[in-house]
Image: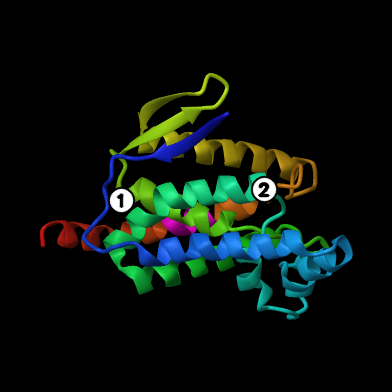
Amino acid sequence: MFFPVGDSDVRGPIKPVINSILILLNVAVFLYEVSLPETQLNGFIETFGSIPVEIFRGQDLYTLITSIFLHGGWMHLIGNMLFLWVFGDNIESSVGSWRYLLFYLSGGILASLTHAILNAGSPVPCVGASGSIAACLGAYLVMYPRSRIKVLFLLLFTTFRVSAIFFLGFWIVQQLITGVGSLSQHAANSAGVAYWAHIGGFAFGVLYGFIMRHTVKELTHD
């Protein structure tokens, strides 16, 4: 398995405070989750997770945001926070903290809506920051395609560097192949993973990256 553990430090002049707060908030919410008895945890997930069938009824729309801060297990949390730590800080440093926060939340909302559209009748709660983080990956790909990503190969416990365009391009192609495959099986959620939430968030991030590239250039020359 491969995990990003660093990059070539392409950050702009703004300290990424919001990204750090988001990571801490996600961890704090998850620690609260694991402190709950199973019955209370199930109720907590059903209350604050995004349930497609309810979204399409116009119910509990607040869960489009709250679901972004919930996770289904330790590996789910650790994987998401690792990606957010590597890629999110660069986006915030380049576009500004409050603009980044709006972008992060918007990416998560649009990702959840993408998942809901393809699972309109599903009563299963969707949780996780993956959609927001996928938006960060899409923006990063456009804004810093030549950045070098430090990747950990877990089986051999060794690291190597690849270009962002290769690493993130491989990631989104993998999501697309699996997502399209899940549609052919009449299920947008394959093996418990909301691939189309990833794809929706990534597409939003790519669009945002193209819009914000001029801002990055201006900040770089200040």
The residue nearer to you, when weighing 153 against 56, is: 153
At x 33% / y 54%, what residue is drawn? Answer: 90
The numbered mark at residue 74 is: 2
Position of 103 with respect to 11 (left or right) is right
Corner quadrant of residue 177: top right
**Closer mark to the observer between disc 1 and disc 2:** 2
The numbered mark at residue 143 is: 1
At x 58% / y 51%, what residue is drawn? Answer: 198
Residue 107: tell me if it is visible: yes
Q: Secondary structure at mark 2?
A: helix
Corner quadrant of residue 215: bottom left
The residue nearer to you, when weighing 45 against 57, is: 45
Residue at the far top: name it: 156
Q: Badge 2 local density, few (<14 within 10 Å), some, or many (20+)?
A: few
- In the rendered structure, which amino acid carries the disc numbered 1? Met
The numbered mark at residue 55 is: none
Q: Is 69 covered by the magenta stretch?
A: no
Residue at the far left: name it: 222
Rendered-image quadrant of the C terminus = bottom left
Position of 123 with respect to 26 (left or right) is right
Rendered-image quadrant of the N terminus = top right
Corner quadrant of residue 148: top left
Which stretch did the figure color magenta? 201-205
Q: Badge 1 local density, few (<14 within 10 Å), some, or many (20+)?
A: many
How far across and how far down the image is residue 29, in percent? 64, 65
Q: How is the image coloured?
A: rainbow
The overriding secondary structure of the stretch rendered in magenta is: helix
Position of 97 with respect to 36 (left or right) is left
